[in-house]
Image (tube, rainbow, N blue to C red):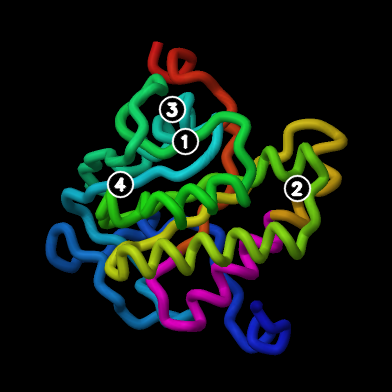
Amino acid sequence: MILAGVISSCPSAPDNPPWVAAGNSSSGSTGNSSSAGGSSSSIAGGSYTIHMIGDSITAMDNSRVVYETEFTGAGIIPTWVGSQTDGNGENHDGYSGQTIEQVSDLVINSNLAAGAGADITMILLGANNIISGANDQAVLSNYSNMIESIYSQNSSTRVVCGMIHPRDTVFTNVVEGYNDNIRTLVTYFSGRGEKIGLRKPLMLYMIPRWLLTG
């Protein structure tokens, strides 16, 4: 259980992903350089294995298109890894219609992070929880357990948690609170010294690949 007192003592996690201001360390390094939260402030250019964990947005490849564009600009060469190949993109662990607790169970019980062995683990989950009106504390607990399991399976991975973009009135009414919860988790793990970052939401997550690539 994450204690409120622990959270309040941690510096606030920034919204930008760590590759926006890529550092100049050696290629392929996700070293733990000094920063406010104790985690690495940047991911240097180089070749990395990337493990995407999520729901239909990941399975349909929308988010990978956005990441590919950002990676190119930051000098990052991704190799996608994961147990699923049934989407429109490369290997991943995106499961359509699944909630955080369902994917968390898969990560924990199927050792998905250990199997992927990725340099960077990207998580984009929560839309289905928001749609179903899930309890905030349950969401926090399941998301936290999933992150703990990822580090347990692959202690050297760098975790990047994506926030959700608002898209209609009902969805938007709760999405800000959800995103605050994700920021809280990232702040907590960062304060613990873990290599973790936060990814602010982009509307491009909801756009099909062919609209972006022609």
First in residue order: circle 3 vs circle 1:
3
Dot 3 and dot 4 residues touching (CB under 8 Å): no
First in residue order: circle 2 vs circle 1:
1
Is residue 185 covered in magenta?
A: yes
Q: CA distance from mark 1 to mark 4?
A: 13 Å
Image coordinates of residue 105 in percent, x first then y, are 53, 52
Specify the amino acid type for callout 4: Ile
Residue that numbered label 4 is attached to: 50
Camera-nearest label, 3 or 1: 1
Could you tell whether 83 is left or right of 9 in the image? left
In the rendered image, the quadrant that contains the C terminus is: top left
Q: CA distance from mark 3 to mark 4?
A: 13 Å
The label number, if any, that marks residue 94 in the structure image:
1
The label number, if any, that marks residue 155 in the structure image:
none
Camera-nearest label, 2 or 1: 1
* Residue at the (13%, 65%) spot, across then down: 26
Q: SS at mark 2?
A: helix
Q: SS at mark 1?
A: strand
Q: CA distance from mark 3 to mark 1?
A: 9 Å
Q: Could you classify mark 1 by the number of other residues whose Cα lies within 10 Å: few (under 14), some (14-19), or many (20 or more)?
A: many
Residue that numbered label 3 is attached to: 61
* Residue at the (42%, 81%) spot, across then down: 193
In the rendered structure, which segment of residues is drawn in magenta? 179-196
Q: Could you classify mark 4 by the number of other residues whose Cα lies within 10 Å: few (under 14), some (14-19), or many (20 or more)?
A: many
Q: CA distance from mark 2 to mark 4?
A: 26 Å
